[in-house]
């Protein structure tokens, strides 16, 4: 059985959907974070798949950018999440709505 | 030598800064000497520049000294720069020259003032501003000076600001001038709009190249005329100048006669290229405003009693002459009259200041008279000033005024003849009111020591009040005595009744005794006792009656006495009232020999101010004050020599100023015979006025009350009418403006704020603070975008 790009794309779409659904349904900030990572890596998978299929380096390059951005996001995001949870260990994200309009 | 131009305004400015820093420490008289010496330095600098300018060929006498770029703004840039040309240097010469003299004079005049150094600080700042005004090479620098002199004028009018009247006079001048400044700014904007520059050099070239349309030029002339009318106190804005006399007299001489008030005429002269291309009717408006102001102010001057107010209205009137000349295109006679007027009006003002100084701050001419014998130098120089302003040849005023009248006569048609007639009538009035002033101040009987009306009133007032209090007391005593009499009478009546009752009781007791049964011993004894008692009561009651009657007689006597005393006091009051009715009233209108009010009968009752004045000696002023008078008197005699009309070679000032006028000077075609005729008419009119003033005020041939009408004294109710208008319909107009401002202008601003706030309130809903909701929004958006892309792919 030849594993074509379609497989990768389907996998990527599935991962992305799982991530989206998780992000929308879960309330624990840490889990939501993980869902975001899932979505980012789903996209990475698409990049790699296309890059391989089209024999173009641009996709690989984009992946590096995404990784760097994701790393940066983790640094900021995790520290916020940790700070929030330290204040209120059992918190859900809906409890943090002080900055509402 | 032209490079010294920057020193001219810089020196007084340096003096100002020095006085700000150390003026108080220098004190009197050093601060004054410092201020005077920087002015003298400025005068020397002006002389240097003047000599340098004379050395240049006539057509190259136009030198611009740029100090630095003040407002660099795109294609528009304004320099702090000085324009040195015959016009500005002529102005600088008399500003610094007369300024130095007036500074010197002030050292004497302000002697003993607690704010001595502050006065000189303002005076130096004024001089710097004024020099900036005339030397500025563009309208903005001139405007800087324009506002500077306005501010200094305000400071100095209200210099003695503790008096409410002085403070409000300053405010009046300031506010009135704001209206003119509004015109100045509009004019600047219009000029910038027309040619993109406000430098005089550019204005000249643009005007000559025809870059300013006639309509624009006309509008510019009209708004600058408003500006000039404010500063130079012309109709409709002249009301502030007579009030400005509240300031110290050197200020009146320097600012409100010689320099600042001429800046309007200077401005219009400076803008002569624009005036030349404007519609002729607009310059004609300038001429008519000048002529009417000259006439109205001269009429008002006749009715004034304050020595300085006469000169103030006279200044307004003479400035009207200059306006007239400018309107007719006669810039040279305007500047000529400006210079000679600066000489003789400064002289007259300083002379009046010397008089005021010498008679202990008295300003009412009706209380002067005969002062020539106390202050001969002041009187002599004042008389020279009088001859100069009255147009008596060969004094300075004659030549310049005649020149202006000649220009009016040269104007074609009825217009010119009317203007000439008004000018001539004004000349007549001028000679009249100035003669009146000289006679009332320096000749005739010395009225300084006379009792004032308010002192006479006070003398009687006090006595009447005292007598009336006594009379009231006496009348109270009479009333109480009468009451006592009534009481005593009532007492007598009561006692008489008691006697009657006692007699009746006795009779009834006797009857009862006779009727009684002697057998009943007990009852009979009682009745006998009652008869005894009743018999005794009779004499007792009679005693009481006699006593009461004696009391009544006493009371009546006291009442009579009190009534007599009250009557005597009433009689005394009547006597004082009669004396008061007989007392001489001080007349409202006096001539040189109006007799003094006869106060001998009640002299000892006059208030202290009267007795103090009797001991005061009018005196001549110190040399610091008389020296400037002598110098100015000399200038007033020979000032006419600047521009003698006989041959073209003698038009010194005319030839000198010509390069600054660029051929825009009007040229008349009057023949020599006409000129002579006009001069003869003018002199004849002046002589008639002087002679008639002598007849009225020295010889008493006519009642001055008939001449000094109240409506003249109040400047034909102009001021009052203006106040009534501004308080009535004007007020509602301004209320309307305020309403517009509040409703529309503020409404727009507040409306924007309210709108933004409401928009924000609406948008708040979109920011619930729930992260998952935002994520849902994002996902929804992605779905929509992807759906759109997919649809496009298949469409």
Image: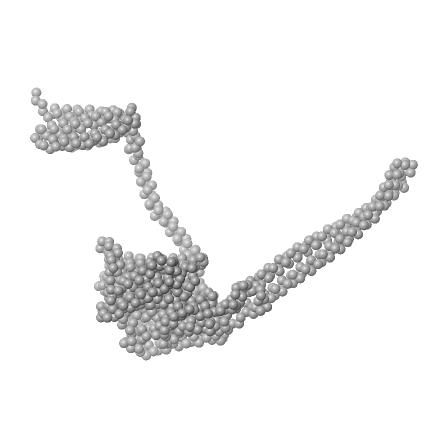
- Relative height, residue B381 to residue B513 (above, below): below
Q: Name the image quarter holding residue B78.
A: bottom left
Q: Residue, x 34% and y 73% (percent of image)?
A: B639
Q: Quick one: which residue is furthest to the bottom in this view?
A: B673
- Name the foreground residue: B275 vs B64: B64
Side (left or right) of B444 relative to B389: right
- Name the foreground residue: B5 vs B752: B5
Q: Residue, x 35% and y 70% (percent of image)?
A: B340
Q: Can residue B149 be seen in this view?
A: no
Residue B172 lies, in percent from the top left, at 40, 58
Residue B527 lies, in percent from the top left, at 87, 40
Quarter occupied by the C terminus of chain B: top left
Residue A6 lies, in percent from the top left, at 11, 25
Quarter occupied by the N terminus of chain B: bottom left
Residue B398 lies, in percent from the top left, at 36, 74
How many numbered marks does the figure carry?
0
Q: Name the image quarter holding residue A89.
A: top left
Q: Residue, x 22% and y 63% (percent of image)?
A: B205
Q: Is residue B444 visible?
A: yes
Side (left or right) of B327 relative to A74: right
- Name the foreground residue: A48 vs B96: B96
């Amino acid at each position: 059985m030849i594993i074509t790009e379609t497989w990768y794309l389907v996998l990527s779409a599935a991962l992305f959907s799982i991530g989206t659904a998780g992000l929308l349904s879960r309330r624990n900030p840490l889990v939501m974070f993980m869902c975001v990572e899932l979505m980012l890596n789903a996209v990475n998978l698409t990049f790699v798949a296309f890059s391989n299929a089209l024999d173009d380096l641009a996709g690989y390059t984009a992946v590096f950018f995404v990784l760097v951005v994701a790393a940066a996001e983790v640094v900021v995001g995790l520290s916020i999440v940790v700070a929030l949870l330290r204040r209120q260990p059992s918190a859900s994200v809906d409890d943090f709505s002080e900055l509402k309009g | 030598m032209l490079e010294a131009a920057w020193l001219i305004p810089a020196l007084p400015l340096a003096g100002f800064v020095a006085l700000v820093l150390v003026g108080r420490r220098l004190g009197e008289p050093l601060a004054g000497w410092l201020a005077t010496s920087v002015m003298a330095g400025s005068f020397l600098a002006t002389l240097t520049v003047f000599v340098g300018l004379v050395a240049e060929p006539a057509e190259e006498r136009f030198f611009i000294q740029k100090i630095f770029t003040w407002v660099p703004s795109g294609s528009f840039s304004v320099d702090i720069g000085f324009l040195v040309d015959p016009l500005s240097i002529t102005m600088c010469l008399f500003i610094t020259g007369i300024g130095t003299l007036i500074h010197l004079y002030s050292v004497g005049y302000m002697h003993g003032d607690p704010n001595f150094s502050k006065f000189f600080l303002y005076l130096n700042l004024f001089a710097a501003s004024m020099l900036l005004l005339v030397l500025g090479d563009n309208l903005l620098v001139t405007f800087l000076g324009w506002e500077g002199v306005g501010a200094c004028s305000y400071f100095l009018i209200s210099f003695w600001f503790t008096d409410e009247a002085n403070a409000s006079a300053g405010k009046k001048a300031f506010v009135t001038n704001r209206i003119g400044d509004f015109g100045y700014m509009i004019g600047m904007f219009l000029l910038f709009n027309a040619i993109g520059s406000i430098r005089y050099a550019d204005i000249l070239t643009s005007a000559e190249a025809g870059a300013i349309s006639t309509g624009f030029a006309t509008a510019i002339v009209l708004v600058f005329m408003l500006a000039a009318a404010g500063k130079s106190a012309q109709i409709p804005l002249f009301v502030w100048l007579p009030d400005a006399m509240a300031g110290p007299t050197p200020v009146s001489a320097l600012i409100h006669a010689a320099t600042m008030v001429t800046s309007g005429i200077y401005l219009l002269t400076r803008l002569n290229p624009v005036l030349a291309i404007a519609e002729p009717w607009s310059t004609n408006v300038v001429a008519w405003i000048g002529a009417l102001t000259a006439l109205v102010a001269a009429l008002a001057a006749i009715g004034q009693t304050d020595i300085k107010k006469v000169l103030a209205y006279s200044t307004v009137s003479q400035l009207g002459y200059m306006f007239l000349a400018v309107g007719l295109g006669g810039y040279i006679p305007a500047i000529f009259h400006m210079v000679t007027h600066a000489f003789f009006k400064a002289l007259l003002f300083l002379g009046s200041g010397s008089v005021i100084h010498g008679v202990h701050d008295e300003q009412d001419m009706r209380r002067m008279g005969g002062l020539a014998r106390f202050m001969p130098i002041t009187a002599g120089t004042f008389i020279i000033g009088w001859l100069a302003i009255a147009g008596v040849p060969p004094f300075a005023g004659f030549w310049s005024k005649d020149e202006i009248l000649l220009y009016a006569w040269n104007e074609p048609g009825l217009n010119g003849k009317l203007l000439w007639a008004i000018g001539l009538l004004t000349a007549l009035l001028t000679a009249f009111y100035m003669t009146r002033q000289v006679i009332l101040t320096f000749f005739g009987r010395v009225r300084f020591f006379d009792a004032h009306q308010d002192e006479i009133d006070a003398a009687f007032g006090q006595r009447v009040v005292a007598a009336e209090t006594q009379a009231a007391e006496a009348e109270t005593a009479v009333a109480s005595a009468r009451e006592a009499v009534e009481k005593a009478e009532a007492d007598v009546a009561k006692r008489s009744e008691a006697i009657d009752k006692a007699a009746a009781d006795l009779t009834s007791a006797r009857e009862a005794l006779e009727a009684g049964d002697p057998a009943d011993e007990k009852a009979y004894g009682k009745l006998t006792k009652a008869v005894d008692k009743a018999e005794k009561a009779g004499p007792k009651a009679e005693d009481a009656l006699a006593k009461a009657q004696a009391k009544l007689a006493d009371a009546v006597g006291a009442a009579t006495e009190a009534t007599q005393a009250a009557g005597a006091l009433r009689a005394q009051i009547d006597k004082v009232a009669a004396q008061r009715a007989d007392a001489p009233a001080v007349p409202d209108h006096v001539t040189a020999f109006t007799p003094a009010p006869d106060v001998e009968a009640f002299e000892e009752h006059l208030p202290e101010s009267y007795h103090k004045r009797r001991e005061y000696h009018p005196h001549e002023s110190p040399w610091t004050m008389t020296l400037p008078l002598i110098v100015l008197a000399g200038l007033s005699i020979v000032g006419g020599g600047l521009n003698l009309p006989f041959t073209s070679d003698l038009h010194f000032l005319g030839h000198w100023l010509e390069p600054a006028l660029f051929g825009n000077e009007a040229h008349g075609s009057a023949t020599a015979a006409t000129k002579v005729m006009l001069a003869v008419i003018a002199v004849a009119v002046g002589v008639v006025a002087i002679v008639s003033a002598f007849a009225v005020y020295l010889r008493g041939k006519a009642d001055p009350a008939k001449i000094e009408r109240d409506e003249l004294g109040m400047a034909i109710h102009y001021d009052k009418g203006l106040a009534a208008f501004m308080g009535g319909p004007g007020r509602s107009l301004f209320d309307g403006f305020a309403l517009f401002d509040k409703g529309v202008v503020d409404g727009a601003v507040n409306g924007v704020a309210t709108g933004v706030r409401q928009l924000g309130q609406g948008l708040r809903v979109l920011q619930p603070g729930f992260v998952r909701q935002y994520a849902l929004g994002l996902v929804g958006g992605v779905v929509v975008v992807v759906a759109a892309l997919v649809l496009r792919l298949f469409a």
